[in-house]
Amino acid sequence: VNVGLFDQYFRIAGPSADHVVACLTRDSYSTHAFIQHLMTVLSLLARTPSPEPAEKDFYSEFGRKNTGKMENYEVIHSSRVKFIYPNDEEIGDLTFVVTEKMASLSNLQSLNILLYVLGFQVNTIDGMPQENTSLQSKTLILTSSALFLFSEDYISYPLPDFAKEPPKKDKYQLTDGRRIRDLDRVLMGYQPYPQALTFVFDDVQNEDLMQNLTLDHFGETLNSPTRDSRRDIDGSGEVQWYIFIPSADCREKLISLLARQWEILCGRELPLELTG
């Protein structure tokens, strides 16, 4: 059992590719509750008493059982099932990926990842979300100076034991990225997803963070026509992200952290607008 960054998802892997299930809870509390229930069931199947009371903090236990592998912390349950948690190196790898995308910025300050959250990007028609529109799973990353959207491979990484070769695609594929100081306002309450957030950026032509990115191992250039779906049709010079974050806790934390960084960078409060 592999648990993802910040307990946003987990993956259960068996002896082959046909026995892999990835569950994106997008909520740390749900992930933790499922893991606890799973361990209880495994204990019953192993016909051994639970190794610890239900109220004991599981996270403090796994932190003391590092198996020595550099990639992850591991806990071996009494049923011999491994529960693997990411360590600081995975955060370091993610920081490196984001830093590469910001390398072309002038006066780049030290990068700090403030929030990692799983959500959905709402597809739009003529610049507006529709009732029957599709949702695309995305990873949203907030740093001290920018917002990023990634498509993340939750199934192939980390490599399962049965894997004979690495996946053809990297774990993180950049979708878009914008500087916080280019954020104009945040809209809340758009139908048909009342919990969705709309980030409205000024599309600064000569200073756009993504203008300086070229084709690399993350895939197609971000200046390709595929980005037009996130632009206003009326040519107002704005770029809008429609992001649906199911977890109320994650959503509130994102708004709070983003508002704080925006005030630090722009010197005033972030405009938050409620919409019908």
Image (cartoon, rainbow, N blue to C red):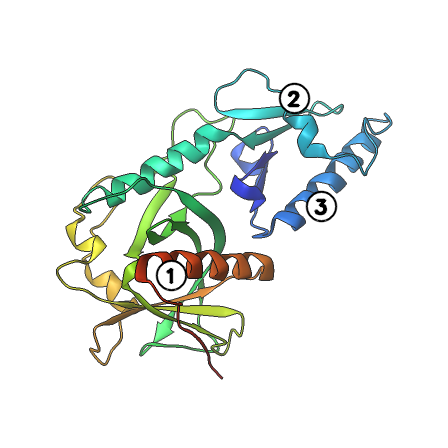
Mark closer to the chain start, 2 or 1: 2
Question: Percent from the top left, x then y, of residue 122?
Answer: 42, 67
Q: Is residue 34 left or right of residue 230?
A: right
Residue at the spot of label 2 = 64
Q: Is residue 214 left or right of residue 82?
A: left
Q: Is residue 113 visible?
A: yes
Mark 1 residue type: Glu
Mark closer to the chain start, 1 or 3: 3
Above or below: residue 203 compared with residue 176: below
Q: Is residue 168 visible?
A: no
Q: Are marks 2 and 1 in contact (CB under 8 Å)?
A: no
Closer to the observer: label 3 or label 2?
A: 2
Crowding near the residue tagged with mark 1, few <14, some 14–19, many ≥20 C-alpha atoms within 10 Å? some
Residue at the spot of label 1 = 263
Q: Are marks 3 and 2 in contact (CB under 8 Å)?
A: no
Residue at the spot of label 3 = 33
Question: Percent from the top left, x then y, of residue 82?
Answer: 64, 26
Closer to the observer: label 2 or label 1?
A: 1
Q: Nearer the viewer, residue 154 or 101?
A: 101
Q: Is residue 36 left or right of residue 113?
A: right
Crowding near the residue tagged with mark 2, few <14, some 14–19, many ≥20 C-alpha atoms within 10 Å? few
SS under mark 1: helix
Identify which residue is drawn at 23% across, 81% down: 234
